Amino acid sequence: MLIIYSEHTSPRLEYICNVLFKEQLGIDYSISNNADSLDGNFIINYSTQRSSINAFQIIPHGLLFEKNIQEQEIDVFRFKSFIKENKKIISFFESPSSNFPFDIFSASFYLLSRYEEYLPYEKDSYGRFSHKQSLAYQNDFLEMPLVNIWIQEFKKALSLQFENLKYNQPEFKTILSYDIDIAWSYKNKGLLRNIGGFLKNFDVERLKVMLGLKKDPFDAYEFMDNLHKNVNAEIIYFFLVAQSISKYDKNISPEKLQMKELVHSTSSKYKVGLHPSWKSNNYQTILNNEKQALENISGKNIFDSRQHYIQFRLPETYEHLINAGIQNDYSMGYGSINGFRASFAGSFYWYHLKAEQTTSLRLFPFCFMDANSFYEQYQDAKNTSIELMHYKTECQKVNGLFISIFHNNFLGTDKQFAGWAAMYAEFISQLR
């Protein structure tokens, strides 16, 4: 049993210890604020007090014992790796005269809680927290799962002092996820929407699809099914089932028979989640109705979600999801750039910073989305293939969780995305 001594306890300390020790290192632990009762082989002294026993000491930064949300003074520095010679690891919240160079508890909590997103910030063009304002982007660690790297270094440092301490860490895992925003490009949109499309731009391809002479360019579902055979990964589809069409919600109506058949056939083979509409982000009732609609169509209870356009704000969006009965959310990432928004490759419970409590909502961060590579980073399929492998490798190196997002339109026959389906197929072949 590992004992963590701290002069004070707090919900923040309890939360981050659960993430680091129980979930990531697989260590049984307890937190104690009684210095006189410390007895054991493995003790972490998380205080400014010096101890006569063989304790591993970390000087607290103080963040975990605060009860408000305020600007934090953050000085980024690099420390010498415990694992690789001549390598330096980026970090902050330095802990001088300690057995570890920084307060890993406070720094990890700052990143996982998304503390910076509760502070005043300038919104991007979609009203979201901009990646450009994040500590990770500004200090060039957005492309790495920094918290996982810290955990590896922490494990090594602990092992140097506590040779017999046992660990049970997670194994590398892949989740292939799909957002079905617009199930078909031309089919099943209705006569008025297709007439409007013809008036804007007469398209021979649209006419052929409508006459049944050509397959819809967004219809990649059979191709995706074939890719998934014998693949070593979990699969999940997120469906947008907005009841009304708007600027950002352009899905096929969930009342369409063909849409119902697609959802139902998909849910018979894979896990299905809700892709809450843009409008639902502001209205609990709309979110509830969309979830109910997807449950009715799929015939299954829906516990998973990912926000359309990665549109969410803290804490309101996550509060709405919990109220709707969502247990797992896959929105923790940016809709403007690929990378690790929470600097973490693994799932974790959302900590409600304003309520100061651990919630029931489990977050599953993604680090790659095709739309980011194409629309935001202006990459072709070849360069995206390199980027995709980079993120998979980064997650694999830390035995983390790799989650990718693809859209059906990228994997169909639309000329705009020529080469993307082949690139993705090559990637999938490496997961078998």
Image (cartoon, rainbow, N blue to C red):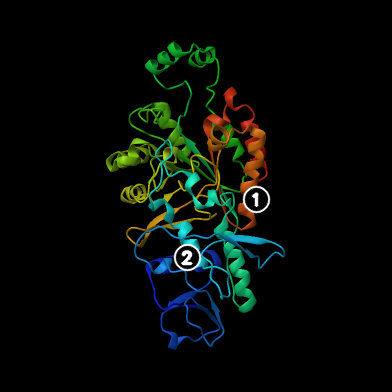
Assess whether mark 2 and mark 1 are in contact (beta carbons under 8 angstroms).
Answer: no
Whether residue 181 is visible here, answered yes or no, is yes
Which residue is at 47% across, 77% downward? 47
* Callout 2: SS: helix
**Residue 211: x %, y % from top left:** 49, 13
Q: Looking at the image, which is closer to me, 144 or 207?
A: 144
Query: Looking at the picture, which amino acid does disc 1 mark?
Result: Thr
Which residue is at 61% across, 58% downward? 399
Give the vertical position of 296 relative to 63 (above or below). Answer: above
**Foreground mark, 1 or 2?**
2
Which residue is at 59% across, 76% downward? 165
Q: Looking at the image, which is closer to me, 96 or 125?
A: 96
**Residue 372: x %, y % from top left:** 54, 37
**Residue 228: x %, y % from top left:** 59, 40
Per the image, the residue denoted by label 2 is: 106
Query: Looking at the picture, which amino acid does disc 2 mark?
Result: Ser
Per the image, the residue denoted by label 1 is: 393
* Callout 1: SS: helix
Q: How crowded is mark 1: few (under 14 residues within 10 Å), some or many (20 or more)?
A: some
Which label was assigned to residue 218? none
Cα gap from disc 1 to disc 2, whole angstroms: 27 Å
**Residue 97: x %, y % from top left:** 56, 76
> Is 246 left or right of 86, judged from the image as shown?
left
Q: Looking at the image, which is closer to me, 416 or 289?
A: 416
Farthest-out residue, left: 285
> Is 85 left or right of 70, judged from the image as shown?
right
Q: How crowded is mark 2: few (under 14 residues within 10 Å), some or many (20 or more)?
A: many
Which residue is at 60% across, 56% downward? 172
Whether residue 425 is visible here, answered yes or no, is no
Of pointers 1 and 2, the one earlier in the residue sequence: 2
Give the vertical position of 116 relative to 227 (above or below). Answer: below
Give the vertical position of 320 relative to 34 (above or below). Answer: above
